[in-house]
């Protein structure tokens, strides 16, 4: 082979691999991407049952109901709409009423959001960014959502660990 | 006083970095030895001053000086000493200080041990290091000063984020940074070569050990982070395709490609321009990782604080260095001479194939990580790209790569014999087929892809062993001769075999864990028994305990199998008073390479507790694989060729070049 032919083989091979990679990416983009919605956006967009999306908002205080065998029901609110969520499993450590949450799943025929993942977040001051942005956009943001606990928190009572 | 001294030392380090980034270049341009030698002394002095600054911050954390904002926000007087020290880099400011400390450490190492480098090359390399260092010192001093004081010091601190109070965290960030920042050396060498307009095989010899060091640490750092997530986050996942994980995977993929292309350049003086580009890309991806993690663009456990000014500053650094180096590349790369010829079927060809697949895989990760950010900026739509995307893109690209791995080392340089290599790999292929057949028979009706994937892994491992057997003449010559030959093999060959086998080992772990994982999730009361994968777990009782800065609820499980009691497991849930947050401490029972994993959820009003129990077959192989790879890297690093042969003056190598 001449130098030119060798180089052409090389370039041809590279282009082939890149084309395969591009095809894989485009294919995966079509099927495996999940959009984020708040309850209001979900109502506006009329997301069909069975289409997966991420639901973000605040856990409606007083809505948390624990059933048998780790079944959990709660509502996600964003200030103007609420959406009931059903989940089965162990909630993340920092799941609290009145705090931000992101759940992934799909609506069922009766309009309940069946979540298969409730995202575990690592910090008590943490408000999921998507949720914070959406709330700000809708004008429901309160500054204390993201505020750090006061320095006097040392005297706060122990939460949750007792039986 | 300590805080002010630390701050002052950091300012001095910035001053030194500015000198280091200008004077040596002038020296190299004018051929002035004294000016070029400035690089060496400033790099060493810079290391001294950053070291002092870091020591000051550590000191402040150890003595719990809450008049310093950084200590107040991230420490607590009751915190164990170990976590007081690791807490230094468990926050944004401290971790950036660690970043520059490691950068200065690498610069100092080049200065101290680079005596055999041509003087002008060393001057350029250290000057480029100086630019990077100066940019990051400015970033720290302008936007994230760890030494800020509080006017009225509080009595007690806010404590470190509880999930970060863990031994895994003590080691994971420094390891990862040694990897990330280590690639700055190959970047500086690449930019220096472009500035000088000269590059030769000796250049690759100097670059390869540095790249290898960075790669070893990055490999271990990623594995450590993954193991930490596995046992600390309480749900048994070890890789989430989270943008922050991807941010570390991308430099690893590019760095692995760089490691292989540097071999071609060193041995055959080919692929020069490509190696330079890869050096630049690898460090650019490290910078991108720093940007993604530290700017607050992504919210995660790694994004300690969200401050727009920081994001903009890091973005500027990113654009400056990536844009600058790529422009320099576009301008000067054509000046570099093209190197040796080779046929598509050859060792070089195999390494090109490796590079092609690694960089393509890296590109798909890049798209999956940045597409959501770009889409949000452009259209405002929020999307998430999760595991399914990466499984559909990254997976298919890795299969041909793994198939090709055993062939590479068996092909000759310049012009290889594919059929001959295939014949020698016959035994490995047969072993793989047997593994597939046995697994199909054993898990009849189960997953179809898993046995094939394990067959592929067996092929990779057996292929690595075949390479060793071929080189030592095992089974063809008397055993004693083979042993003698094995001793005489270059350590780099052993390193290759270990690293490639590690790849196969990790793949077996990944496939077994994802396919044959069994789990029990439910509520249990004391004296209840759960059965998972043949193990009986009896919940004995639930007790409370007071730790140094937390309270914990401990559940005690007695594990038995076939009526025989094995061990007691005590998962717990810790409640950190100061932050009012809790963590889940999973309990692990290791049997061979498999693990039983128990973690706790909430307690119900009736005293029942939610538990997650997993049996994860061969899960430990996922991390043994990377450890094997890193060990292979270490062996290769200790090869005497890299230690003794390296310091060939560039002139000698250049004199050889025209002979081609």
Image: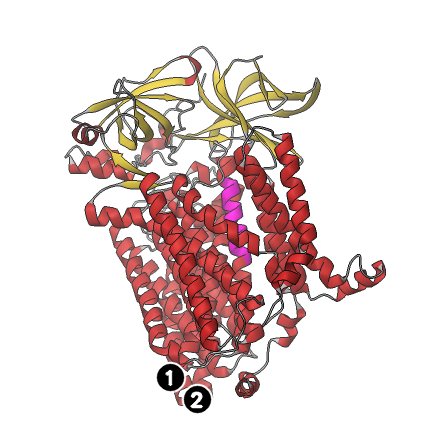
Quadrant of the drawing holding the N terminus of chain B: bottom left
Q: Are marks 2 and 1 on the same chain?
A: yes
- The residue shown at (25%, 54%) is B309
Residue B529 quadrant: top right
Mark 2, chain letter? B
Quadrant of the drawing holding the C terminus of chain B: bottom right
Mark 1, chain letter? B
Residue B391 shows up from this direction: yes
Q: Is residue A115 above or below residue B650?
A: above
Quote the CA–CA distance across marks 2 and 1: 8 Å
Q: Horizontal and vertical percent for residue B578? A: 39, 33
Identify the main secondary structure in magenta. helix
Residue B113 quadrant: bottom right
Q: Are marks 2 and 1 in contact (CB under 8 Å)?
A: yes
Mark 2 crowdedness (10 Å alpha carbons): few <14, some 14-19, many ≥20: some
Bounds of the magenta span? B216-228
The residue beneath circle 1 is: B26
Judge from the rendering whether residue B415 lies leftward or rightward of residue B377; answer left or right: right
Mark 1 crowdedness (10 Å alpha carbons): few <14, some 14-19, many ≥20: some
Residue B93 shows up from this direction: no
Asked if residue B222 is among those painted magenta in the image, a careful observer would answer: yes
Q: Horizontal and vertical percent for residue B642? A: 62, 71
Label 1 SS: helix
- The residue shown at (17%, 32%) is A140
Q: Work out whether residue B416 or residue B610 is closer to the camera in this orientation and state it.
A: B416
Q: Is residue B531 above or below residue B197?
A: above
Q: Horizontal and vertical percent for residue B550? A: 47, 30
The residue beneath circle 2 is: B32
Q: Earlier in the sequence, mark 2 or mark 1?
A: 1
């Amino acid at each position: 082979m001449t130098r030119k032919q060798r180089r052409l083989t090389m370039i041809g091979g590279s282009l082939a691999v890149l084309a395969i990679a591009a095809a894989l990416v485009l294919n995966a983009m079509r099927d495996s991407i999940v959009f984020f919605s708040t309850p209001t956006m979900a109502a506006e967009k009329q997301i069909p049952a069975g289409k997966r999306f991420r639901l973000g908002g605040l856990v409606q205080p007083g809505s948390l109901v624990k059933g048998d065998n780790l079944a959990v029901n709660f509502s996600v609110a964003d200030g103007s709409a609420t959406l009931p969520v059903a989940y089965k499993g162990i909630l993340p450590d920092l799941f609290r009423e009145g705090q931000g949450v992101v759940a992934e799943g799909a609506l069922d025929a009766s309009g309940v959001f069946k979540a298969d993942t409730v995202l575990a977040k690592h910090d008590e001051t943490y408000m999921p960014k998507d949720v914070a942005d959406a709330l700000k956009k809708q004008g429901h943001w309160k500054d204390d959502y993201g505020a750090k606990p006061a320095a006097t928190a040392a005297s706060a009572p122990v939460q949750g660990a007792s039986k | 006083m300590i805080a002010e001294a630390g701050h002052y030392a950091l300012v001095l380090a910035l001053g030194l970095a500015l000198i280091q980034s200008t004077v040596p270049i002038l020296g190299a341009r004018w051929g002035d030895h004294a000016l070029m030698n400035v690089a060496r002394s400033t790099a060493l002095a810079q290391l001294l001053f950053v070291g002092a600054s870091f020591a000051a911050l550590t000191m402040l954390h150890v003595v719990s000086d809450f008049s310093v904002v950084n200590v107040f926000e991230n420490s607590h007087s009751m915190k164990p000493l170990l976590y007081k020290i690791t807490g230094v880099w468990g926050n944004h400011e401290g971790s950036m200080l660690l970043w520059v400390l490691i950068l200065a450490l690498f610069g100092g190492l080049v200065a101290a041990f680079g005596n055999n480098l041509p003087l002008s090359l060393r001057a350029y390399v250290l000057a480029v290091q100086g630019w990077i260092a100066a940019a990051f010192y400015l970033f720290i001093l302008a936007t994230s000063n760890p030494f800020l004081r509080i006017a009225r010091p509080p009595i007690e601190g806010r404590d470190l984020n509880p999930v970060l109070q863990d031994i895994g965290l003590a080691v994971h960030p420094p390891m990862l940074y040694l990897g990330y920042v280590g690639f700055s050396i190959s970047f500086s060498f690449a930019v220096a070569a472009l500035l000088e307009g000269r590059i030769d095989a000796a250049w690759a010899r100097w670059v390869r050990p540095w790249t290898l060091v960075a790669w070893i640490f990055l490999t271990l750092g990623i594995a450590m982070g993954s193991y930490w997530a596995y046992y600390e986050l309480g749900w048994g996942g070890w890789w989430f395709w989270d943008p922050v994980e991807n941010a570390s995977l991308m430099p690893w993929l590019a760095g692995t490609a760089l490691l292989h292309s540097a071999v071609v350049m060193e041995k055959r003086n080919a692929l020069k321009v490509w190696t330079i580009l890869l050096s630049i890309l690898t460090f650019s991806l490290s910078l991108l990782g720093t940007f993604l993690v530290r700017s607050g663009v992504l919210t995660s456990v790694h994004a300690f604080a969200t401050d727009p000014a920081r994001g903009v500053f890091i973005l500027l650094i990113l654009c400056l260095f990536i844009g600058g180096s790529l422009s320099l590349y576009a301008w000067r790369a054509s000046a570099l001479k093209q190197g040796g010829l080779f046929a598509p079927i050859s060792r070089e060809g195999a390494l090109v194939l490796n590079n092609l697949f690694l960089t393509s895989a890296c590109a798909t990760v890049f798209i999956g990580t940045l597409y959501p950010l770009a889409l949000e900026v452009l259209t405002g739509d929020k999307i998430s790209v999760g595991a399914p995307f990466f499984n559909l893109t990254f997976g298919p690209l890795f299969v041909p790569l793994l198939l090709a791995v055993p062939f590479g080392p068996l092909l000759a340089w310049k012009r290889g014999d594919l059929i001959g290599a295939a014949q020698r790999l016959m035994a490995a292929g047969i072993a793989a087929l047997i593994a597939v057949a046995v697994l199909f028979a054993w898990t009849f009706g189960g997953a179809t892809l898993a046995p094939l994937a394990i067959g592929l892994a067996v092929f990779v491992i057996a292929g690595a062993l075949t390479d060793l057997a071929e080189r030592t003449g095992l089974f063809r010559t008397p055993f004693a001769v083979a042993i003698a030959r094995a001793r005489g093999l270059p350590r780099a060959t052993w390193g290759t075999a270990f690293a490639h086998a590690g790849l196969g080992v990790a793949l077996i772990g990944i496939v077994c864990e994802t396919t044959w994982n069994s789990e029990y999730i439910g509520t249990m009361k004391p004296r209840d028994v759960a059965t998972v994968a043949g193990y009986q777990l009896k919940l004995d009782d639930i007790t409370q305990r007071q730790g140094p800065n937390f309270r914990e609820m401990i559940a005690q499980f007695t594990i038995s199998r076939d009526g025989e009691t094995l061990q007691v497991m005590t998962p717990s849930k810790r409640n950190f008073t100061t932050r009012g947050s809790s963590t889940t401490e999973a309990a692990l029972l290791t049997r061979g390479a498999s693990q039983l994993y128990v973690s706790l959820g909430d307690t119900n009003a009736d005293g029942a507790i939610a538990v997650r129990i997993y049996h994860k077959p061969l899960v430990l192989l996922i991390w043994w694989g990377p450890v094997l790879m890193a060990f292979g890297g270490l062996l290769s690093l200790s090869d005497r060729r890299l230690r003794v042969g390296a310091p060939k003056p560039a002139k000698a190598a250049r004199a050889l070049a025209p002979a081609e």
